[in-house]
Amino acid sequence: MGFYKPGSKKEAPNFERVEIERTKATGKNLLVEVREISVNPTDLRTCDGKREDDHSVTIVGRVAAGVVLEAGNDCSLFQAEDEVFYAGTSNIPGSLSKVQLVDERIVGRKPKDIGFPEAAALPLTSITACEALFDRLGASRKAAGNNGKVILIIGAAGGVVSVATQIAKLVGVTMSSITMSLLKRNWRHLEFTEFIIFFV
């Protein structure tokens, strides 16, 4: 699925079913059969970034989970039939397609104990959570380095937070969260939070 015209800030583009030539995997690229995708705000930015004079088809979608069909001749991390998941980039055709070419260096091996839908929900949220915890807030990747560290999360019902609370628990960071009381029954990740403040 793709679009030719960018649409506007108020209206989505007119998506069309298009047929494009299937390319071979070369170099460090994997040809992945897309099994599941997730929709993210980055997809909107892809639409917003399309120039008026660009008449080529744009396929959106950054995040996907699938099975490797082919591995390029320079690939060393994956091979055909490997189950993978990844958050792609905006400079390649997106994952809203049957197959996608993606650089193996930004691909991860799909955990065996979860399905493709769950795997497709993880890459972008996990990357964001790790960047926030380790790169921005300076948490250590080892529990011994996080003794006494406490993080307060305001608005603890989002996808990134649901991952961040679990990662924080693994590395010994104490989590405190503020969230709406109406949401508390629907979010299992709050079990990993030491202190929770609910509001109406």
Image (cartoon, grey):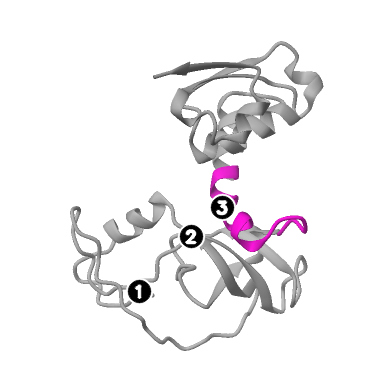
SS of the residue under disc 2: loop
| Residue 120 is inside the magenta segment | yes
- Image point 53% across, 38% down: which residue? 160
**Earlier residue among tags 1 and 3:** 1
Left or right: 183 as drawn, with respect to 121: left
Q: Position of residue 156 (x, y in %)?
A: 50, 28
Residue beneath disc 1: 2
> Cα distance, mark 1 to mark 3?
21 Å
Residue beneath disc 3: 121
Above-or-below relation of 124 to 157: below
Left or right: 15 as drawn, with respect to 90: left
* Nearer to the camera, 151 or 196: 196
Residues in magenta, as a range: 110-126
Q: Residues within 10 Å of mark 1 (few under 14, many from 20)?
A: many
Residue beneath disc 2: 62
Above-or-below relation of 151 to 19: above
